[in-house]
Image (cartoon, grey):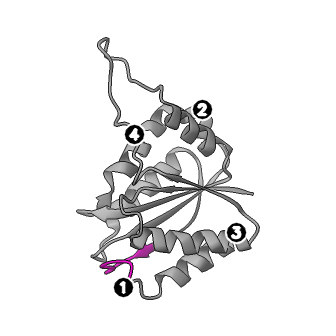
């Protein structure tokens, strides 16, 4: 089974990365072939249009992401929360997904890992539920790490992420 983890955190060594790494370790120990695609530190170009008002969808990294998403059995979205929503980097991924309907409307599993300084995940949970439902994906679980102020304050969330990764 192949798993793609899309990391939407702009922090190289932040809490999202630490929790995601534990999730990845668990998934690999369970036999998953894990690929990580970073859009946080190395963001995709924002959605734009040309002079004729056509969306610009040609970019080497976009093609790589679309291919990786198409081939993966499980897609994991990892993001910090900013004002209760996903990072701008992750939102860019979601914006492009609307153009990849044919490639993504397959039997897949979607997972959400979100990290916040608060414990209110209602908005991001709703968004990702709608995204997974739109593409007909099975919900594989979530790690909602609340009241996390940094990579030194992760509490039990890395273990929860590890266990979820191992269960898939």
**Residue neighbourhood size for the residue with mark 2, other residues' Cα within 10 Å, grouped as few (<14), some (14–19), many (≥20):** few
**Residue neighbourhood size for the residue with mark 3, other residues' Cα within 10 Å, grouped as few (<14), some (14–19), many (≥20):** some
Query: Where is mark 2, residue-wise?
Result: 102
Q: Nearer the viewer, mark 3 or mark 2?
A: 3
Measure the alpha-carbon separation of dots 4 and 1: 32 Å
Q: Nearer the viewer, mark 1 or mark 2?
A: 1
Query: Where is mark 1, residue-wise?
Result: 153
Q: Nearer the viewer, residue 18 or 67?
A: 18
Query: Where is mark 3, residue-wise?
Result: 28
Measure the alpha-carbon separation of dots 3 and 1: 25 Å
Whether residue 105 is visible, yes or no, is: no
**Residue neighbourhood size for the residue with mark 1, other residues' Cα within 10 Å, grouped as few (<14), some (14–19), many (≥20):** few
Q: Which residues make up the magenta segment?
A: 144-152
Q: Residue at x 59, y 40 (%)?
A: 104
Q: Residue at x 59, y 52 (%)?
A: 137
Q: Say left or right for 44 vs 52.
A: right
Q: What is the x, y in percent for residue 5?
A: 56, 57
Q: Quadrant of the C terminus?
A: bottom right
Q: Quadrant of the N terminus?
A: bottom right
Residue 46 location, quadrant: top left
Of mark 4 and mark 1, the one earlier in the sequence is: 4
Residue 93, numbered circle: none
Measure the alpha-carbon separation of dots 3 and 2: 28 Å
Query: Where is mark 4, residue-wise?
Result: 95
Measure the alpha-carbon separation of dots 1 and 2: 41 Å
Measure the alpha-carbon separation of dots 2 and 4: 15 Å
Instruction: Inspect the magenta stretch and tell me whether residue 5 lies in it.
Output: no
Of mark 2 and mark 4, the one earlier in the sequence is: 4
């Amino acid at each position: 089974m192949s798993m793609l983890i899309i990391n939407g955190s702009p922090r190289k060594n932040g809490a999202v990365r630490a929790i995601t790494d534990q999730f990845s370790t668990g998934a690999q120990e369970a036999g998953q072939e894990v690929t990580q695609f970073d859009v946080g530190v190395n963001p995709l170009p924002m959605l734009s249009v040309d002079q004729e008002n056509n969306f610009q969808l040609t970019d080497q990294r976009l093609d790589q992401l679309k291919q990786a998403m198409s081939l993966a059995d499980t897609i994991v979205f990892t993001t910090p929360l900013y004002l209760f929503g996903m990072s701008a980097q992750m939102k860019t991924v979601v914006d492009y997904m609307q153009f990849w309907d044919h490639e993504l409307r397959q039997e897949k599993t979607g997972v959400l890992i979100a990290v916040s300084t608060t414990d209110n995940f209602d908005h991001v949970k709703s968004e990702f539920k709608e995204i997974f439902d739109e593409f007909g994906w099975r919900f594989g679980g979530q790690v909602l790490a609340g009241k996390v102020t940094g990579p030194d304050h992760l509490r039990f969330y890395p273990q929860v992420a590890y266990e979820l990764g191992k269960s898939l």
